[in-house]
Amino acid sequence: MTVPELTPEATQFRDLGDGTRHLRKPGENVFSWQARRLTNTRTFASLDHESETSQMKRVLTVKDLTAMGVGAIIGTGIFVLTGVVAHEKAGPAVCVSFIIAAIVAGLAAMSYAEMACLVPIAGSAYTYTYATCGELMAWIIGWDLILEYLVGAATVSVGFSHYLNAFFQDAFGWQADSKLMTAPFKYKNDTFSLTGDWFSLPSFLIVLILTFLLCRGVKSSARVNNVLVVVKLVVIIVFIFGACKWVDMDNFKPFIPPNTGTFGEFGPSGVLRGATVVFFAFIG
């Protein structure tokens, strides 16, 4: 196979991101060339050039972006994980778990904000990694992000299915067939197991609907997100003020229950392990 070489005429375009940086230099062996390709970074000049020539329309306002951030935080995690972590891992000290997770999430947010100002184009962590660590690490991060969003979407959609089933059962006394409401397998206590059910139909439908909405365009999805954020904020505020009179301080004793003999179940280790779980609440 003939390998293209980097000619003197091509070197003048190296900062414009046109692909010539991947060409083989005269006299360079194949292994060095491939290693250099894997560690090639995108220059800030090429990123600025791409940003200026991008065909993507910037249609989101400050209100839309703020609502997206709030909507991402106020997701399934805040409604589901609080009780689970308090019951199984941290006890009343779940509030400490949230504080620890908030500090970590805040540091991550500041890092993202700084990188977004430095590299103001689409791509998020993939683009940031490409500009600083090279093509190989960017490739890994890109696939990590795809896996993260796949797992996150699956988790949230399954949670939606359980919410929907509980709503119809409490409001109308209608109990759906679990074989069409529950995923065929579950993950608990670090192991996968079969549930005996067939297919989570509500999970599939909500993913299908939201996918169609995203295909309609970012502006349409932003409008729907703004409405949902308002609804979630109202629900949380009403719940907080409505539940104030039911607060019993005796339930906070002991604040950190003794360890059960298993790492991560109450005690200081439970608080820390709870923080790793409730961190999910800060990303939805």
Image: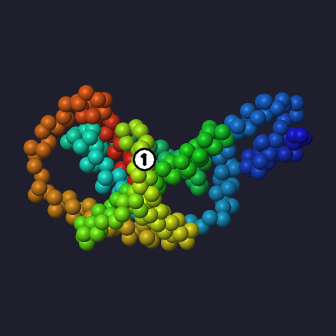
Locate the C terminus and report the quarter of the image it occupies.
bottom left
In this view, 30 is above or below 79:
above
Q: Quadrant of the N terminus?
A: top right
The structure residue drawn at horizontal position 25% and vertical position 38%, both measured from the top left corner, is 90
Q: Quadrant of residue 130?
A: top right
Give the percent coordinates (x, y) of residue 148. 50, 48
Residue sitting nearer the eye, 241 or 85: 85
Whole-percent x and y of residue 66?
Answer: 41, 61
Please name the amino acid that badge 1 sits on. Leu
Residue 105 sits in quarter = top left
Q: Looking at the image, is 19 positioned above or below residue 217?
A: above
96 to the left or right of 17: left
Which residue is pictured at 26% across the width and 31% down the height? 268
Q: Nearer the viewer, residue 211 or 56?
A: 211
Q: Which residue is mark 1?
A: 194
How many numbered circles are shown?
1
Q: Residue at x 21, y 61 (%)?
A: 239
Instruction: Using the image as rendered, state which of residue 188 and residue 122 is in the foreground.
Output: 188
Label 1: few (<14), some or many (≥20) within 10 Å? few
Q: x, y percentage for residue 188?
A: 37, 42
- Asked whether, in this view, residue 10 is left or right of residue 206, the answer is right
- Residue 160 seen: no
Residue 260 visible in the current orientation? yes
The percent position of residue 136, horizontal first and vertical second, equals: 66, 39
Give the residue displayed 22% in from the left and 40% down from the top: 91
Residue projecting furthest to the top: 261
| The quarter of the displayed image where residue 272 is located | top left
In this view, which residue lies farthest toward the right? 2
